[in-house]
Amino acid sequence: MLIVLDTETLDELLADEHILNRVKLECLLLPYMGLRPLSQITVPAEFPGGLEMGQRIDRAIKPHMDRLQAITEPRAKVQVIQETRKLMETQFETVVENSDPYKTYYSWSDRLGLKSEQAKVRPTVHEIFLFKDGRTGKELKRLIKDREKLRVKVQRRPDPQIGRIRFAYPEEFNVKWITRMGRLLGYPDCCVKQYAQDRVKGVNVETRAATQLAEVLNEEKKVDVHAYILGFFFPCRPDCPNSTEKGFRWQEEFSKMDERLGEMYAELLGVNATMVLRQPELINRYIAQFQKPAPEKDGADG
Ligand SMILES: [Zn+2]
């Protein structure tokens, strides 16, 4: 059952500096080993040097955004919005698609026999999904299409009552969509269910998860980090039996393939748990960017 990678290839992958260690394990090896149907990364953010790539694009776009702010005539505005969008797409091609991390990621996906699908979240933010079997690919395509439909729906009839995040990412508040995507990404059902319920009820999942973990730590109880199986994953509770079991199994499979992988994964589990503790802080920083003066509904948000 276990698919072993020859040592030479594995050495090469481990030494590759164009891919983060977390991404090597979570996004390339887990689907390759058949332990997770689908993986997802957001680019350029999750590439080494991704932050700088984003900044380079922002700098190139800034003059157009400034011009856009100054225009009031509607037809001229539509024209500049279209030009800006086009520029964003060209910038993504030049800065991201031409980069070593981007090319390296696809080359590893090919070498490991994985298939890929890319989705445009915004003109300068894309998601790359990797998977092994065609059935996963088909369900993923349906999910991407359904997300598009949900977005078109809220944009067509914007509800002033809903917040900016709910407007930008309506799928994050749709139980069915979250459940299907969560399963595909290898999250345990109980954790997906909790995540979906929280989102819909308006509970901040990141804060909930951070508080749960902080409470256990405050009681000076030991936390088993095996529940924190992936980055940006929130277990239903710090001692969720299903995710903990998964964490142990994945660690064991990694160790069986190569001791170094087992050690890397053990370290990653700790990092994941620490990130959950820090989430409210990170999220606040993220939300702050949505609290700038409201752009036009049809604006060219990068
Ligand atoms: Zn759970």
Image: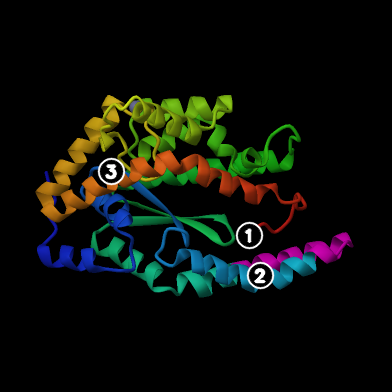
Cα gap from disc 1 to disc 2, whole angstroms: 9 Å
**Magenta extent:** 69-88
Dots 2 and 3: beta carbons under 8 Å?
A: no
> Does dot 2 land on a helix, a strand or a loop?
helix
Please tell me whether mark 1 sits on a helix, a strand or a loop.
loop
Q: Position of residue 2 (x, y in %)?
A: 12, 46
First in residue order: circle 1 vs circle 2: 2
Mark 3 — residue? 269
Q: Mark 2 = which residue?
A: 61
Q: Quadrant of ligand 1?
A: top left
Quadrant position of the N terminus in the picture: top left
User: Is 224 on the left-hand or right-hand side of 86?
Assistant: left
Q: Which residue is mark 1?
A: 302
Query: Residue 225 shows which numbered tag?
Result: none
Q: Secondary structure at mark 3?
A: helix
x and y percent of residue 72 in the render?
88, 61
Q: Tell me where residue 183 sits by quadrant.
A: top left
Residue 228 colored magenta?
A: no
Label 1 C-beta lies within 8 Å of the nearest ligand 1 atom = no
Three-letter code, disc 1: Gly
Between discs 3 and 1, the one toward the N terminus: 3
Kind of residue sitting beneath label 3: Leu
Compared with 126, 219 (above or below) is above
Q: How is the image coloured?
A: rainbow
